[in-house]
Image: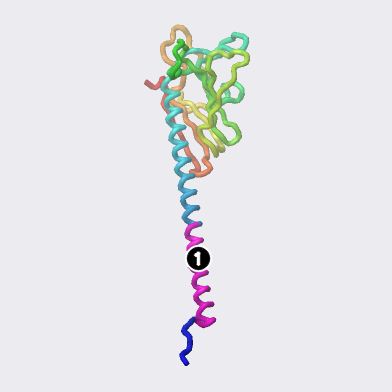
Amino acid sequence: MQSEAGFTLVEVMVATFITAILLAMGSLLISDTLQSREALNEVIEDSQELELARLVLRQDMAQLVERRPRGAYGEPAYSAFLGGYAAPDNALLAFVRTGNEFPGLELPRSRLQYVEYRLVEDDLVRASREFVDSVPGTQMHQRVLISGVSNLEIAFLNGTSWDASWARPLSPTQRHSSAPEAVALRFDHARYGAMELRLLTVAAS
């Protein structure tokens, strides 16, 4: 009588143990891969956010105009460019720029735009409104440029020194811009640590 071929209980248990180990290793590998991909995507998103913010700031500083916005009661602002402690309502920057586009709009509209930069909690926010002068009922459109910002400081180039605030009225006899030659933003980023953005303005040209 021939004995039937098969696996012993010990062999089955060993095979099951090895399979469990391989499955656990595969699961950890997949989990690490997904976490690495998620971390890489976050790094890419933060890098793109910083680069886009730099481009927006640079474009704003390159298109400053000497147009003082008026308040709700028609009073003109002290200067066309205000920054630091001189900016209104705890803003970092307040200015008027040109180059505002209206794609697809056939009716004529002013290309001027009033812009403010603010620190809202841990976000650097760009706020703008459709009209240069303050009109009752007009809301500011806000856009987060950089998230995860702390310890933000702003400085303005005044010749060879940097000032913490800026307000320079433009007299009729002056031909140069009332804006500083450059603006510097120093802050701590949640991912990249200490950073500084230096931007030339139209006054530097």
Q: Nearer the viewer, residue 11 or 73?
A: 11
* Mark 1: few/some/many CA within 10 Å (<14, 14-19, 20+): few
Q: In what quadrant of the picture does the C terminus appear? A: top left
From this viewpoint, is residue 83 visible?
no
Q: Where residue 140 sits in the image (x, y, percent)?
A: 57, 22
Tell me if residue 137 comes above or below residue 45 in the rendering: above
Chief secondary structure of the magenta portion:
helix
Q: Quick check: is 196 in the magenta stretch?
A: no
The residue at the far left in this view is 205
From this viewpoint, is residue 115 visible?
yes
Q: Quick check: is 27 in the magenta stretch?
A: yes
Q: Nearer the viewer, residue 106 or 86?
A: 106
The residue at the far bottom in this view is 1
The residue under the point 46% across, 84% down is 5
* Residue type, mark 1 in image: Leu
The residue under the point 49% across, 48% down is 38
Q: Where residue 179 sits in the image (x, y, percent)?
A: 46, 19
What residue is shown with label 1? Answer: 23
Which region is colored magenta?
7-30
Tell me if residue 44 comes above or below residue 185 in the rendering: below
